[in-house]
Amino acid sequence: MIPLCVPEIKGNEWKYIKECLDTNWVSSVGSYVDKFERDFAKFVGANSAVVNVNGTSALHLALKVLGIEEGDEVIVPSMTFIAPVNAVKYVGAEPVFVDICRDTFVMDAEKIEELITQKTKAILPVHIYGNIVDMDKVMEIANKYNLYVIEDATESLGSIYKGKHTGTIGHIGCFSFNGNKLITTGAGGMLVTNDKELSERAKFLSTQAKVTLENKGFYHSDIGFNFRMPNILAAMGCAQLENIEEYIEVKRKNAFIYNELLKDIKNITLPVEKPQTKNVFWLYSILIEDGFPVSRDELIKIMYEAGIETRPFFTPVHTMPSYLNCRCGDLSVTQEVSSKGINLPSSVSLKQENIEKVCEVIKILGKKL
């Protein structure tokens, strides 16, 4: 089976983790925690970074430190992994769903303003599959209405928008290091910001709002969270980060191979890279249009029978039981793209012959036209 997206572990992971085991520094205090934060902030070009136990906790923490609370509204896309929407509910706020762009599959910034009310406190763009939201427009709207912007960059680590890494353009950016992400710590996340006060507040709340007294006792001045990343996972993150530039280039090279092999097949839509952006193509994602000989779901089944793992695009969150009554705009593009989208194998370890096998299945089907 050619997997959809699996981790690449080839560097100093064993060495750094063994050091944690040899020294007993395996929990949330240790040199690798600080190093991972410093190295990650440097890589993305942020002033500071705060490690978290996963990407969802980073999103939750971001909303919390910005003071988003019950009665507030946050504008989010419906076609996304459910984590950012759930995080909005964690703080008692309400998600408001905005439609997406058909070519990039991300939040349509042109449709945000019509959804803003006096309750709106933040915009939460999600850069899915490596694609990038039009952040100039998002920030223009946010500045006009005095709104916060929290970027969910969990799937776009390495993507660049007009010279800046995704996650560093809004007030706060959040990343995930789940096993299928560009770099992994098994589980883990990161919050980045250029605002020192927000960073310090995030670090404080993520460590149970703990103050160490003179007698070494603990005092808690606020309700905090146990969102700390263990040193042993941070050690893996440091090792992974050492190879991130290579991983990015492999992802992009593989996407260009896909593009070349699939460009002449009718009734499929390939991913794009907008001017002044650099798409990391975390997952190589295409649309199976109406004129193609088989449907998206039929293709998934055919691929599986050929030993190829694929995955459909995210099911729109506004169709989930917990979110049926949320306010939203016209989500017709969301509905269409979700029903036609498929993610193809995209591991860093993917070989050209694997890509050729995937594309050959699509080509054979396409010839039935």
Image: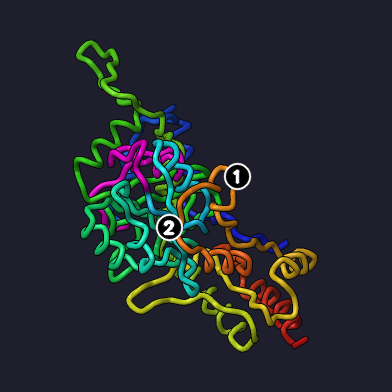
Residue 167 percent across, percent down from the top left: 34, 56
Label 2: which secondary element: loop
> Which of the image's four quarters has the C terminus?
bottom right
Residue 241 percent across, percent down from the top left: 40, 54
Residue 60 located within the stretch drawn in magenta: yes
Question: Which residue is situated farthest in the top direction here?
Answer: 215
Residue 319 percent across, percent down from the top left: 59, 52
Residue underneath mark 2: 126
Residue 205 located within the stretch drawn in magenta: no
Tell me the residue at 43%/39% (across/down). 57
Distance, label 1 to label 2, CA atoms, is: 21 Å
Judge depth for marks 1 and 2 and give the one in front. Answer: 1
Q: In which quarter of the image is residue 87?
A: top left
Q: Are marks 1 and 2 in contact (CB under 8 Å)?
A: no
Identified by mark 2, the residue type is: Val
Q: Is residue 24 above or below residue 52?
A: above
Q: In this view, does 271 lie above or below 37?
A: below
Q: Is 203 left, or right, of 367 in this rendering? A: left
Q: How crowded is mark 2: few (under 14 residues within 10 Å), some or many (20 or more)?
A: many
Q: Is 72 left, or right, of 327 in this rendering? A: left
Tell me the residue at 59%/59% (across/down). 5
Which one is nearer the viewer's eye here, 38 or 87? 87
Which one is nearer the viewer's eye here, 358 or 167? 167
Instruction: First in sequence, mark 1 or 2: give its number.
Output: 2
Q: Residue 133 carries which label?
A: none
Residue underneath mark 1: 321
Identified by mark 1, the residue type is: Pro
Label 1: which secondary element: helix
Q: Is residue 53 above or below residue 325?
A: above
Query: What's drawn in magenta, residue-wise?
Result: 44-73
Q: In which quarter of the image is residue 294?
A: bottom right
